Amino acid sequence: MLPLASIVLAAGKGTRMKSGLIKVLHPIAGPPMIAWPVAAAREAGSDPIVLVIGHQATAVQAVFRGAADIRSAMQEEQLGTGHAVACALDTLAGFSGTVLILCGDTPLLRSETLKNMLTYHRDNGAAITVLTALMDDPLGYGRVVRDGSGQVAAIVEHKDATQEEREIREINSGIYCMDSGFLFANIKEISNDNAQGEYYLTDLLAIAVRKGLTCLALPTADADEIMGVNDRVQLAEAARILRSRINREHMLNGVTLIDPDQTYIDHGVTIGADTTIHPGCRIGCGSIIGSGCEIEAAVSISDCRIGDDCHIKASSVLESSELGEDVSVGPMAHLRPGTVLGNKVKIGNFVETKKIVMGEGSKASHLTYLGDADIGRDVNIGCGTITCNYDGVNKHRTVIGDEVFIGSDVQLVAPVTVGRNSLVAAGTTVTIDVPPDSLALSRVPQVNKEGWRLKKKS
Ligand code: UD1
Ligand code: CA
């Protein structure tokens, strides 16, 4: 493969987001915005990728911690896109090949588009190639000025453009391929003599033209791809487009989405064929869902592994949990982190679980809290059961053996063990271990005072 390096500009704050968080760290369909152009650069074959960072630099670096192909360069003061690229060049010292330059705020860019651009750039032996688009409303973008023969002459920023230049609909996407030799030799020639007093990277085009080098502009077929996110309206618009791409892929893989416009699946989710997802569901990054599952409306799933043929009923919330096959959850159940459910487990409405393991065929069908518990197979947990796992200082575990039957309204005061095949009677507060095959009963005997109401009234 021909040597390719990328520079991703991400030092700006993103003032128009009106946020405490810098623009490129706003999540979009899962990952932070900047992860998208970085992934596109990587898929196009780039190594290394240099991030130009400034505002909240440590937080940006943290996104890519451990990635061997990512380097970063500081731009202390944001003096313009030309200055930003200049800041990255020390990090690329000794590199010879093609340099791809991208912005951190273009999450819709596809690697195929970058690959096409690279081929066009290399096949024509260009010094610089810019990706452009035709826009009905080019307001704010740099305009691509072409000469009488249609060759690129320069890019003029909106603020510097004449009335005539502002009529031009071909705009600069801010995405470029450059020959490294040309870039290193000419970056210092950029001046800040313009309306914004900034060093414009775009000046490199006019410089190349002046030196008689090949300078190309390649219009993209899909103007959406180069959309830059500047404010939260554009953030929502870009997220909508990304989600529709993600949803389309799942549908082509055999997943039924009842209403794709109202299904929120993050990047990096795996879903098996013949699974049906109803409207209003949110499925977070990294989740794996098996085939033949039914996920009813308004379910939220994050970081879960769900086996085949599971049924997740409406309005349930599942976080960092693992489900076997043929498991039924909800409606309105809450599986909190560390929940591990075996095959054929049933968790019913208004049940909350946390850090529990539940064996095959066990059931907690109604109104229950199970936290810090090891529950065997074929256990029945009655309505209103509570594991009292917290003594105000420490958390303790409850252990329930196979085939145990826990009646309704039972409190299990942990640490406590109920041996296999025992029965805990309704209303019992279990404070001492129950041996196997036993009955545990801790009810206050009932007293009936006959005629008591009549006496009270008289
Ligand atoms: C830039 C282009 C414009 C193009 C548009 C496409 C220039 C001079 N203009 O304008 O022709 O149509 O992108 O979206 O290049 N950045 C830094 N350091 C800086 C300045 C910017 O890292 O000193 C980063 C920003 O964080 C951002 C990117 O570069 O990710 C683009 O900067 P921005 O200020 O948004 O440029 P535009 O005015 O949109
Ligand atoms: Ca921009």
Image (cartoon, grey):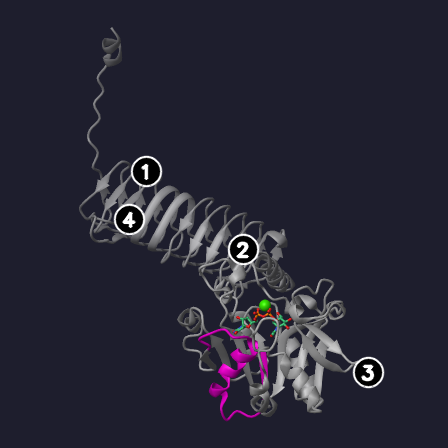
Nearer the observer: mark 4 or 1; the answer is 1
Residue occupied by mark 1 = 408
Name the residue at the top extreme: 458
How many angstroms separate mark 3 from mark 2 (CA)?
59 Å
Residue occupied by mark 3 = 149
Q: Earlier in the sequence, mark 3 or mark 2?
A: 3
Which label number is shown at residue 421? 4
* Contact, mark 3 vs mark 2 (Cβ under 8 Å): no
| Label 2, residues with CA under 10 Å away: few <14, some 14-19, many ≥20 | many
The answer to whether residue 107 of the structure is visible from this angle is no
As displayed, is residue 156 above or below residue 188? Answer: above
How many angstroms separate mark 1 from mark 2 (CA)?
30 Å
Part of the protein shown in magenta = 75-101
Q: How many marks?
A: 4
- Mark 3 is on which residue type? Ser
On the picture, is 354 further left or further right than 102? left
On the picture, is 201 further left or further right than 421? right
Q: Earlier in the sequence, mark 4 or mark 3?
A: 3
- Mark 1 is on which residue type? Ser
As displayed, is residue 41 above or below residue 341? Answer: below
- Which quadrant: the N terminus? bottom right
At x 49% / y 77%, what residue is drawn? Answer: 51
How many angstroms separate mark 4 from mark 2 (CA)?
32 Å
Task: Describe the element under mark 2 as helix, strand or loop.
Answer: loop
